[in-house]
Amino acid sequence: MISFGGGSSHDTAKGIALVAANGGHIRDYSKGVHLSKKPQLPLVTVNTTAGTASEMTVFAIITNQEDETKYPVVDKHFTPIIAVNDSELMVAMPKFLTAATGMDALTHAVEAYVSTAATPITDASAIKAIELIVNNLETAVNDGQNRAARDAMQYGEYLAGMAFSNASLGFVHSMAHQLGGVYDLAHGLCNAILLAEVSRFNAKQVPERFVDIAKAMGIDTAAMTQEQAVNAALEAIDALSEKVGTKQRLADLGVTEDKLAFMAQNALNDACSLTNPRKASLEEIVAIFKARM
């Protein structure tokens, strides 16, 4: 099989390839991780965004429109045999798509770096990804024909994919999945809206990790306290999101408070929540949603 496009194209192809080889329904493989018994059909992914990194990860995101849920399926057999990234296929991406997919990639890197499953290998990939994305996303958004920025973004999103495919993710993705399932909002936009707020919650557990993230974002932390460095990282995340046009309020996108508890419960049940560095109650997840309303 060959998939051409971004995350939705690749995830659809992964689901087809896995079920074709193993039988059943794709939801059968969401009740745990690495549940398939046989390799999927050989899959070549040609990527056009930077990006979800779905062209090379063990993740596929599935939407069930019947019950308004969106959930990850994690399976080692999802990994394509060849992944193609060529910035020539990305120069025509519209500004919003460049921004949303770029913030998605930044979220992958940040969540992988603070994950409870992080390792020195995933850390190295995540930190370099943060550096590349922060230094090039705004240019890629405003000057889409800039090959250097596009090249840097494709390397950044790929490194972020290497990081989270091994270290997994956290509450940003768990919560963003629910916004996508209920309101059909762009995944990268949801991540961009939630990233700083979830990071503020997580920083109470792993502040030293966010100091490292601040440094990767180019912030001089030498004269700062740990708390100041953490806050600087959070402010820089929101500032980048604002510069590229993804800092929006959930209420302006049609999100209503009557759905928050439903989405919060599904977020806690999402597989990505397993590796978030700080545990949360239903009420705490609702509060994070409300902070971005």
Image (cartoon, rainbow, N blue to C red):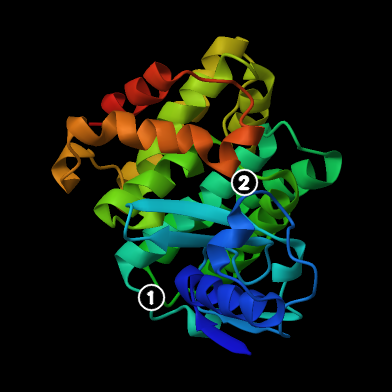
The residue tagged 2 is 109
**Distance CA(mark 1)–CA(mark 2):** 22 Å
Q: Residue at x 31, y 28 (%)?
A: 261
Question: Who is closer to the viewer here, 153 or 201?
Answer: 201
Question: Who is closer to the viewer here, 211 or 37?
Answer: 37
Q: Which quarter shows the C terminus?
A: top left
Q: Is residue 277 above or below residue 253?
A: above
Q: Is residue 196 above or below residue 12?
A: above
Q: Residues within 10 Å of mark 1 (few under 14, many from 20)?
A: some
Left or right: residue 61 compared with residue 180: right
> Mark 1: which secondary structure?
loop
Residue 39 appears in the figure: yes
Residue 18: give x, y in percent of width and height. 66, 75
Residue 5: give x, y in percent of width and height. 48, 80
The residue tagged 1 is 93
Q: Is residue 162 above or below residue 79?
A: above
Residue 60 appears in the figure: no
Left or right: residue 209 compared with residue 63: right
> Mark 2: which secondary structure?
helix
- Disc 2 marks a residue whose amino acid type is Ala
- Disc 1 marks a residue whose amino acid type is Met
